[in-house]
Amino acid sequence: MTPKPGPKLAATPQLGLPFVQQGPAHDLTYYIGICTVFAGYHKRWPTPQATREEFRAARIMGYDGRRLAREVRFPSPELEADPSYQALQERCRADGIDDGIDLAMLDPRHRSVLRDDVVAELFESLALPDDAAPGSVRYATGLAAHAPDELTLHFGEAIRTRAVEAAGLDPFDPKVLRHTFSIRVHANDELKQFIDRVGMAYRSSDGLLADHYRLEASDDGRLHIRYQMVEGSRYAGRFDPERETARLADMLAAGLGLARADRRDDAAGEPNARVAAPRAGGDAELQRQLRMLTLDGCSLKLPIQALSRLPDITLAVEEAGGVYRPRRQQFDFPDNETAADALAQLLAHYDRKPGR
């Protein structure tokens, strides 16, 4: 006698995990749980291009990458009210991301930032670079090369300007410019571990850190790790702009050999000029560095090498109608023809021999 088939078993949920909710209300933990299960099976974080079959293979039913990304980017009232989701939104805004949260932002590597005390420790190590000793490795500016764990830190223009003024220094003194754009910090172990943990392109052990990265401290208190040779950066944490402005001012004021802005006369009794205008001809170094400028549309781009005569070049190009964009390392003109004419005139002017 053939036994009768038993009753069909009802399908059971496939996400019966302690960190994944089964009810209708889905908070941030629910979506992170889905991504974690997917990553545990496929060894990669899900993307909007992930197929329904890939989710089924990971025993996640009813989802594909597009649906998951849509629910995260356009939250339900329950998800929008979740404090963890709101904190992630604030984190993204701090990183300059205002167009919503995507799946990559749920990745723990993305959500990780440096603790405030770690950032404070980085700023405690602020130091002015030293001039290179005879026979040692140096840059074109004459400054000593970075030590293995040193990084350049670029302050925002507002912080730098306020600090220089508070220190009573001449903001246009070439030595002041050279030092304030080359502030050094010592990379602590937490920063190097952070670089490795969040998956940046170069590991902290791959040669000299300064060859790959620099730090940027923006005027609104955001600290970023930026690549030196390729596009891109990574938000790392926050700092107090007012406190670091005061710290930078104190450090600059104590710097040896930096000219004071409030001096009235120089040793010869002549008034202190802002920056002496470079003269035509007779300056081989200036001529050589001017020829390193390249025309790019309506802009004159600076070379990748540091220029020791940058203050003189800036003054000359601005007098020719260019506007200096430090972050882009270029001078912008109204149109292509004006930029080309300015470059030709500068080269002709400073290539003339004295007395002609």
Image (cartoon, helix red, strand yellow):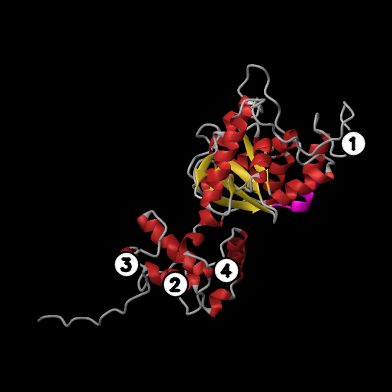
| Nearer mark to the viewer, of 4 and 3 | 4
- The residue at which mark 1 appears reads as 264
Q: Is residue 191 magenta?
A: no
> Label for residue 56?
3
Q: Earlier in the sequence, mark 1 or mark 2?
A: 2
* Few, some or many residues within 10 Å of mark 3 (<14, 14–19, 20+): some
User: Could you say whether the residue bearing mark 1 is in a helix, strand or loop?
Assistant: loop
> Magenta-highlighted stretch: main secondary structure?
helix
**Residue 343 in which image quadrant:** top right
Instruction: Please state which amino acid type lies under the numbered disc 4.
Output: Tyr
Q: Residue, x 49% and y 44% (percent of image)?
A: 230
Return the x and y of residue 86 as percentages of the image width and height: 60, 69
Q: Tags 4 and 1 in contact by the CB under 8 Å rule?
A: no
Q: In the image shown, does 225 or 10 lie closer to the viewer?
A: 225
User: Could you say whether the residue bearing mark 3 is in a helix, strand or loop?
Assistant: helix
Instruction: Please state which amino acid type lies under the numbered disc 3.
Output: Arg
| Nearer mark to the viewer, of 3 and 1 | 1
> Label for residue 70?
2
| Nearer mark to the viewer, of 1 and 2 | 1
Instruction: Please state which amino acid type lies under the numbered disc 1.
Output: Arg
> How many angstroms separate mark 3 from mark 1 (CA)?
78 Å
Return the x and y of residue 344 as percentages of the image width and height: 55, 39
Question: Which span of residues is magenta-colored?
Answer: 239-246
